[in-house]
Amino acid sequence: MQKALDLAELGKLDFERPREEDFPALALARAAGEAGGTMPAVLNAANEVAVEAFLEKKIGFTKIWRIVEHAMEQTPYLPSPNLDEILQADAVAREMAKVLIV
């Protein structure tokens, strides 16, 4: 059994600025969070579909963020959605993501 992480035992943590140019998904997540509305649901839905495809070896790892980006660009954005609109954005984003999985 693995020992639980004890942050006090570590003593010090150093953080660096995220390298969004090396990790494009970070920039997409930041954009979704800043946009709000339906965009976080779109990002999450497309990411779930893309990661599942990756785990099933249908796509390569670097294609995940491209699929998410496509869904974010193509799914209609609503700034103040109700629950039904969020669920609809989720469904649309999943379909947009599936289109790019071959």
Image (cartoon, grey):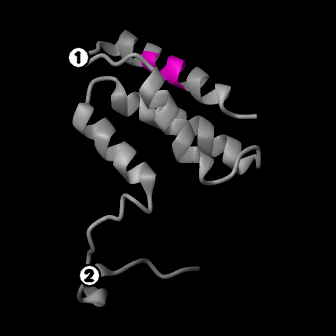
Residue at 30 percent across and 40 percent down: it is 31
Give the SS element for disc 2. loop
Residue at 24 percent across and 89 percent down: it is 11
Which secondary structure type mostly characterizes the magenta part of the structure? Answer: helix
The answer to if 24 sits in the magenta stretch is no
Q: Amino acid at mark 2?
A: Leu
Residue that label 2 marks: 13
Q: Amino acid at mark 1?
A: Ser
Relative to 53, is 32 on the left or the right?
left
Relative to 100, is 25 on the left or the right?
left
Image-quadrant location for residue 88: top left
Crowd band around label 2 with a 10 angstrom C-alpha radius: few (<14), some (14–19), many (20+): few
- The quarter of the rendered structure image containing the N terminus is bottom right
Residue that label 1 marks: 80
- Quick one: 20 or 6, which is closer to the camera? 20
- Disc 2 to disc 1: CB gap under 8 Å: no
- Quick one: 15 or 2, which is closer to the camera? 15
Identity of the residue furthest to the front in this view: 21
Q: Where's residue 17, x and y in %?
A: 26, 68
Q: How many marks?
A: 2
**Residue interval drawn in magenta:** 89-93
Query: Residue 60: which numbered mark, if any?
Result: none
- Quick one: 12 or 97, which is closer to the camera? 97
Give the SS element for disc 1. loop
Q: Where's residue 42, x and y in %?
A: 43, 28
Image-quadrant location for residue 33: top left
Relative to 75, is 35 on the left or the right?
left
The disc, 2 or 1, on the residue closer to the chain's N-terminal end is 2
Residue at 51 percent across and 32 percent down: it is 70
The image shows residue 92, relative to residue 63, as above or below, that is: above
Relative to 14, is 94 on the left or the right?
right
